[in-house]
Structure formats: C-alpha cells, structure tokens
Amino acid sequence: MDVTRREVLKKIGLGGLVLVGGHIVKSPLSLTQLAHASDDKKWKQFAGSKIVFMSEDTPPTAAIKSKIQSFKDLTGIDIEIIEEHLDIVAEKVGIDVRGRRGAYAAYYSQDKPIGAVFYKHAEDLRKFEKDPSLPKVPNGTGSDVWLNRFLDITGRFYDDPKIAAYPYDNAVAVMMYRKDLFEKYSPNFETETGKPLVYTSKTTWKDVLEICKFFKNAKFPDVKYGIALQGREGWGGQLDYQRVSYANGMWLEWDFDDYFGAVNPGPCKWGDEQSIMTMGNYKELMKYAHPDSLTNDWSGANTAYVTGLAAMQPQYGEFAAVVEDPKQSKAAGGRTVYDLCPKGDPSWIVKGGKAVNGTNCGIGGIAINHWAKPEMQKAAYLFALWSTSHDTQYMVLKDVGGTPTRKSVFDMPDVKKAFVRETAPMKKIKPVEMEKGVMVDKVPLMPNALTYGPILKGIWKPDFVVGPKVPKFNEYIQIQTSEIHKCVADLKSPKEACLSIKKKTDRLFRV
Amino acid sequence: MVDSKEKAINPQIPTLQEEGVAQRLFSRIKGLLPFHLWIMLPTIIVLAAITIYPFVWMVVMSFKETAMNPGESDVWVGLYNYTRLLDDEPFINGVKLLLWYFLLCLSIEMLLGTSVALLINNIKFENFFIIIFIMPMMVAPIIVGYLFRFLYNVSFGWGFWLLKSLGLMSGETILANAKPWLFSFFPSTAFMAVVAADVWEWTPLIFLIVLAGLKAVPQDQLEAARVDGAGPVRTFLEVTLPNIKSVLLIALVVRLMDNVRYIDLIYVLTKGGPADTTKILPFYLYNVSFRYFEFGRGAAIGFILLLFTIFMGLFFVNVVFKKKGV
C-alpha cells in the first residue's frame, strides 16, 4: 500500500488520540501504515536484493503472489516465489539445506513433513525479533497473537526452545456436505433407516458410513457416492486416517505431547485393540467411498466433490474458495454447508475411550534458511513478517482467498460476518448457469471464512490433533499408509496390517 | 636445432643433446597409449571426474549413515545398509515389481514397435505415419502421467469408461485398484495401468529404431528371397530378422536402462500405491533418498540397482544375442 509522508504525518496527528484510546485492534490498517512509515528505513535497508521463497502451491501463496507488489514497494526487495506440490517442496528444501546451499532464503515449512524433519536447518526467529535493526509489526509475533498455539505447531519442535517458523497457512479440516442433496434424499433415507438424513456436529463416523452406504446403493442420478476420502499414500492418507482414528477414543500412535513431538518416540501403539478396530472401520468406509479415494489427495477428493460425484468430503478450509466458485463447482451457490469433522462412535471405541470431533491440520509456516547469507536471512525475515502480518493476511483473505493465522483477522467485524452464509458479504459476478434454470450471480466475498465457524470450534482440545511430530515423519507415514492400502485392498487383515505397521515403525525408530 | 653458442645467448632454447632427451621422452610417453586414446584423453579425464567421482562417493556413502542435521557427522555402519535390505519388504517388493515391469514393458514394446515398423516400412504416406507414431515419444513423461491420470479418472476419464465398457476390468477404479488384473498371478490393475502408459509413450522409440534398421536391410537379399519364392513370414524370419538383430539389441538395452531409472509416470499416476503395488525399485530408491533423506541406504540401493543393470545388459548382449551371432 502506498503511503506518502504527508499522509503519514496527518495520520500521526489525527490518529494519536486513537492510539491512546486503545483502538489498536479496531484500526489496524492505519496503524500498520504508521508502523511502516516510522520503520521506513528498517524496511528499506535491503532494497535491491533478491530472495527466493519456496512454497507449496497453496491458496495463500497464490494470494500472496498476486499481492507481492505491496511487499516490493514497502521493502524494495525483489522476491521470487516458487510454487510446487508439497512433496516437491519437501524434496527441494531437503536437498537445499542438506547441501548447505541456502538458495531458498525463505521456505514453506509444513509442521510435520518439513518442520519436524528439517527444523534444525531453520534459523531461530527469536534472533531477528531481538535485532533492533529490524522492524516490528503491529501486535508483534508473540505466541498470543496467533490462533490456538499455532506458533507451537509450526515453530516449536521437540525440546528445542527455538522458534523455527511463523504460522503462515491455516489448513484445518472441516466437513463439507451438500445440503441440497441431504434435503432432497432425506425421505428416502428415512424410509430406509427410520431417521432423517442430516449432518450435525454430533454425527459420528458410523453415521457417515451409513450415509455412504445409502448413497452408493441408491444410485441417484445426481450423486453417486456419499463421501470422497483422501487416502493417497503419504501425508494425505495419514491425515485422512487420523481423522477417524483420533475421533474414536482419541487414539494416537504415541503418548507424547503432540504440539512438540519427540525425537525418540519409543514403542508405538499400533497393533492394540483400538487400532485394529479403527483399521477395520476405515476399510469399510473406503469400501463405500468414492472409488478413487485410495489414490486421491486433497485436490483429488475436492474434484470428486465439486464435480458432484460425492455428497460429503472432509476437507481443508482453504478449498471453500473452489467449492463456492460456480464456474468450477456443482456444490456452489449455497449448496454446501461446513461443519465440524465427524465424531467418534461409542460402538467403534474399545475400553471406554472418549469420542471427539477429530480435527486435524497442516499448519504451514515460513522458515528462514540457516544456510542463507546473513543479509539474505534478514531480507527473508522481512518477507516472513510482512506476509504473516495482520494487514497482509486480511488483504489476501478479502481480495484473493488467504488462510489467516492471526487472531486479529478473525476478530475483524466483516470477517466475523463472513463466517455465516446469511450475513456473509457477497460480490457480484457474471451470471453462471449451474444447471438448467439455476443461475448464480453472487458469490461470498471471503469464501474461506465460511469454514471458520467449525475451524474455530475444532482447533481446541480434545477435538484437535496436531501430531505426530517425529524426525522420520515422511518414512513413518509411508509405512502407515501403504499398510492401510494393503488392508483396504484385502491383501492383509486389519490385525496383520496394524501389526506390520508396529513392527516397521518400531524398527524405524530403533525401539 | 641449436648449438652451444646460441644456447649461451638464449639459455631457454634447448641444446641438441637436450632436445634429443626431450624427444626421446616425448616418444616414450606417446608410445604409452595409442594415438586415438591420446586425443580422447582430455574428454576421458572430464568424464571420469563427473562420473567416477560420484560413483566412488556413492559406494563410500553406502557404508555410512549420513548426518541429517548441522553439527552432526556421518557414522560408518559397514555393511548394515546392505544387510538390512535382505528383510526390507519394500525393497524386495520393488525388485519383484521391477522384473515384472521389465518383462511387460520390454516384451510389449518390442513386439508392438517391431510390428508397426514392419507395417509402415515402404508404404505410401510412410513419412506421415512416422510423424503420427512418434508423437507420444515427444511428450515429457510427466505430461504423459497427467494425461493418463485424466484418462483413468473414474469421474470423467474415457479410458476408464472404455475398459469398463469392454469388460476388461473389474472393480470401480483403475489407479486405486490393488487387485490383480485379469489373472490372479498378474500384478495389480494400477500396475498394468502404469505399464500401458509406458507402452504408449515408448513403443515409438522401438518403432523408430527398428524402422531405421529395416531401411538398412540389403535389397538384393530381399529380392533374392522373393525370387526364390519365400513368403512374407519366411522373408522376415530368414532375411529381415537376422539383419535387424543388432538394432533390436540396441533398442532393448536402451529401454532396459530407461526402465531402471524411470519414476516419472509412477510419481504422477500412483506415487507407488495402492498398497505398494506400483512401487518398483527405482521409485523406492527415490523415496529413500529424496523423501526420507537416507542417503546411505539410498546409495546401497542405487549400487545394487547399478549392478543389476550391468548384469541385465550383459545378459542380453552376451547370452541372448551373442550366441546367435549378433
């Protein structure tokens, strides 16, 4: 945002009282302008330098990229943003840091696949926070400014006090379902089961299975499957399974604090009674889910949902932007409702464990490469500060669809209104015919905000599950998901699959 | 030639005696290697630096557990990286699948490529057909992967629809189908789908090489066969095949080496799943090295894969072809 010195002086004069009055949160935009102006030299000290930010091709990065001129104007730093699939990002960042090159001064650090593995190659951000030559942003970067412990999730690993990354991308799972289809087929469902076809935060995974069976067996013309899952080998599959396993008895592989993780996690719990039961139930869910659920990741599942093949999908909030776009989605036009992920079912839990709405996440952070030159690190830090600041997060949420991580963004009145479809600010679009006679000419201004209601409920214990943060996370999830696949494909029984995971995982961690 | 007076004036100019020594020394060095090797020496040195050094480093690394973090150092683990592979399920599974991959891809591609080359050779509009047939080869493997991913898609892929309509597959999915295709001893449906994509892309290479070989078959031999009353099959078996055996060998070895390092299609289509049924050894090697960053274990697998490639190459060159006089 361009601010002239005259405007700044005017605002200092007029806005001084506002500051004293404590309206800090209410007028963050002008405050940031002031902060920028007063720190002008600090922001501009690396003008002319060029840095590279390696990121996942995630909506917030696309949004940041489209607004990058603001950063260039503020700092004079030329930044190249490379967007890749998460696996490629992990691979390239891994090669870069293991090769001690520091080519990517800033990199996208997903909490588990990148952060938990390479956190030692990230610079401690507290060093920059203490550096008087570097600017600050309004509200600062302390742990209390982010959503529930997001700084711990992205920045803290094991017993190391260092802060390795700032929370940048908030991908929390919610349940998205087609309200129109639920209403339309409720009488059929009621005839079959004696209960209405509804989804609430009390709906359990067992209920979901029943709904999946109903849709798959009914062969309706406008929807084929009840749910689209994301069982692809790797992280997608691990998260997909975790939503079911945690919901039923809050089952975790290990007992350590999942916000911080453990370098030596000890023997895992795979193979216990609960894990075997959940494995069997997940297999059953897969049987009635969209048939590509075993190879779909989040994008694949979303494609199945927006093309109208599935009536539900557990999905990350950021996908609401696609779901609500009538040009891309049959689920747009107010047809989708967002709610908490399904709850565990008492009959799916052994030994009286607790049933919760298992909600998991992938909180992406921005980390500064330990191997980059000190000046490049500082320039990258400016980018990390700017891209995670209140103003930037609010701007990209409003204009292009970001995923904020700062509490203050969620407190903005217009963002709060956008949580609920009925009060959400809308924007006019060129009318789109979704099907014969059904036109859509308005879409939510902040579609991602429609998911914030369930997200803000789901990110607290006991519903929220964060881990497992372990140094060999990428190999562990490969072991886990390939055995789940074997079970789903009838190549192994649930017990055999769980015991095999136990054997391989314990060997991996040298137990 | 200089004498001692000139030498006194300019000491840098060698004397006759000194020149004799230098000349003898030069001829002795020159005699160490044949002339053509001297010419190639600079290139050999450069190539050695960029291939032998990494190779030696790979072998050394295979005996270590490499450090992951700053401040840590590599640990010498002896043969552990090799011995652990003996009961490493993904490794053993990867070897089995690689053999299946060789068998299916090479046999289908050789058969199809040779057949199409024979059909196209010397027909009207030959050049047009050549252009059409070699098109898949010009597409980057990653793009081929995405293309087939769409074709196999359950929601909108006509490849899926076609196979299903023809009754050539059971189940509701191709890429997520870990069940054997058609026969119970066959690999999974997903694996066969990857093979089909490989065949689509690389049959043109075999076709092109064989077609080049066919152009070199002596016309007088073909005419002699025709005059002697040999039919097309006999002409092919007695005249054409012996003449193109060497190019078939080249095609086979080229594809063999390609398959050993081929992960692109699998990366895009299945990522090794479902249930590890498409995780051929090179893909497992990629996972170990660049997803788990276990360079020591990766080096051990890479070294075994290299030995395997050399063995297979020698097998084709010496056993399959040489005995029959290629």
Image (cartoon, rainbow, N blue to C red):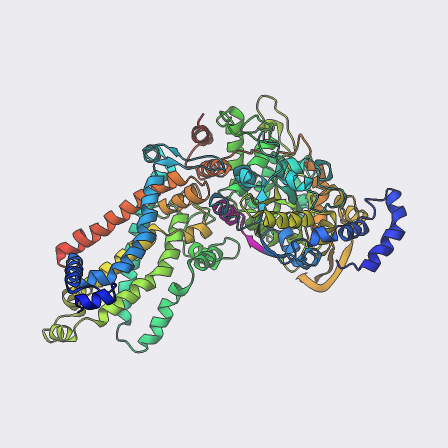
Which quarter shows the N terminus of chain A?
bottom right
Start and end of the magenta stretch?
A: A81-95
Residue at screen point 16% across, 75% down: B219
Q: Position of residue A20 (x, y in %)?
A: 88, 43
Q: Name the image quarter holding residue A257.
A: top right
Residue lying furthest left: B228
User: From the viewer's perspective, is B71 left or right of A5?
Assistant: left
Q: Where is residue B232 in the image (x, y as percent from the top left)?
A: 18, 69
User: From the viewer's perspective, is A32 left or right of B244?
Assistant: right
When the figure is inspected, residue A78 is found, relative to residue A480, above or below; the finding is below
Magenta span: predominant SS is helix
Number of numbered callouts drawn: 0
User: From the viewer's perspective, is A22 left or right of A120?
Assistant: right
When the figure is inspected, residue B118 is found, relative to residue A274, above or below; the finding is below
Asked if residue A331 can be seen in this view, the reply is no
Front residue (pair A189, A71): A71
Front residue (pair B193, A437): B193
Q: Where is residue A453 in the image (x, y as percent from the top left)?
A: 73, 42
Front residue (pair A245, B287): B287
Which quarter shows the C terminus of chain A?
top left
Residue B62 forms part of the magenta stretch: no
